[in-house]
Amino acid sequence: MNEQDAVPGEWSMVVRVPVEPVEAAMEADALDAAVRHSALAVRGPLFGVASHSEDDGRRWRVVVEVTHGCPQQARDALNSLLWFRAKDEAKSRQERRALLAAVARLEKEHVDELTVLDTRYRVVRAEEYAAIDAHGGIETPRPTDPEPLTPDWSPGSGARGPQVDDNLVLDPDAPLTPLQAAERLTLRSLAYSGTRFPGPVLADSTRAVESHPDVLLMPAGFLIVERTGNSPWSPGSGLQATAHDARRTLHFALTWMEPRIRGLIPYDADPTVDARHPGAGNTEAEVTELKELVKASDQLRAGRCDEVEAHGTVYRIARSRRLLRWGPDGPEGPRPSDVSTHSPSVLHPRLDEDGTVHFDDEPASDESTS
């Protein structure tokens, strides 16, 4: 079937059997994971922004990571992206004027798509899900998931590592391995069901299967999930690019944040004070609590540890997956039933066409106020 003659949901897929050793190992890992984790738990939507230019064909490029919890957060991130581009990269007043016009719209309107300087920007919607086993256990990182050669546990090192969706190209025509193709075909029919979803959410989900019948699988991400007792797993962090990033985030939470939440270290204590170096003044019981947090954090640093327990709470590094629904015009945008936590607003100081930032607008002249 010719690509141009294919109807949505019938686009051909190029399946390539991996023969290179690393790719073959990753495919074997995926097969083992599919056997162990035969069900899916859908967490809900995440939002970001993708761009498309005339020469991109069916490819779109992620310019705002698809990790935001509501559409307006993605719009705000696009607002900042265009504002800083106008401030730092615009080569002429005309170019800066076009960028600032887009910023002005984003400050006032719920804009899910706009074109700026021949580039289309679209707020895109991904479904986040995780694989679970027969006992409800969420999948942990696979042996072939990327890891740094030398783990860096220093504060702030995450900013120097890979970022989620950095330079990611969304290419629905990219070759797939057999297991990727099988997963993509299986998830085409994914839609919400059950009484816990409001009627409009269910209706939008069903409609999306028709309007955007194909799916594109995004790279795996990693996050902390936690539970106490028999409670369900709940997310304890945002999405990270690597499993080590999630472990480092958990390490910081155990040694720095948890002692403050538990009242073991004052919130206004010196930033260098943590569970390992609490200073003086703690009672014997408090020292015991701090040692338990340190013990769990030490387990994380001892190797590729993906689950620890402290004070009755189990913390796990979970492997998160995302899919974008895809239609004739590209990736799906927000649905009518998707809710934002806030409205559009002005995020940055006024920038004029010459690139000058005005932190405080000048008082109106007598002529303008008369």
Image (cartoon, grey):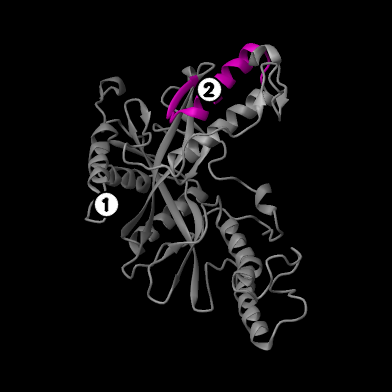
Report whether 249 appears left or right of 128.
right
Magenta region: 90-115
- Considering depth in this image, is 188 or 369 the residue closer to the camera? 369
x%, y% of residue 364?
A: 68, 19
105 part of magenta stretch: yes
Q: Residue furthest front?
A: 370
Of residue 77 and residue 29, the one placed in the foreground of this image is 77
What's the residue at 65%, 48% (across, down)?
Answer: 161
Residue 18 rendering spot, x and y as whole percentages: 44, 45
Which label belongs to residue 197?
Answer: 1
| Residue 349 in view here | yes
Task: Give the residue drawn at x 71%, y 26%.
Answer: 358
Q: Quadrant of residue 278?
A: bottom right
First in sequence: mark 2 or mark 1? 2
Amino acid on which the number 2 mark rests in the picture: Ala
Indicate the amino acid at tag 1.
Phe
Q: Main secondary structure of the magenta part?
A: helix
Secondary structure state at the residue bearing disc 2: helix
**Residue 220 as seen in the image, left or right of residue 179:** right
Please name the residue shown 57% across and 16% down the image: 98
Picture layout, residue 103 above or below residue 32: above
**Measured from the top left, where is residue 361 in percent x and y?**
69, 25
Residue that carries the numbered disc 2 in the rendered image: 102
Asked if the magenta segment contains residue 84, the reply would be no
Q: Please indicate, yes or no, whether residue 176 appears anywhere in the rendered image.
A: no
Question: What is the distance, in whole Å, between disc 2 and disc 1 at their CAs?
Answer: 35 Å
Residue 17 horizontal/vertical position (percent) = 39, 43
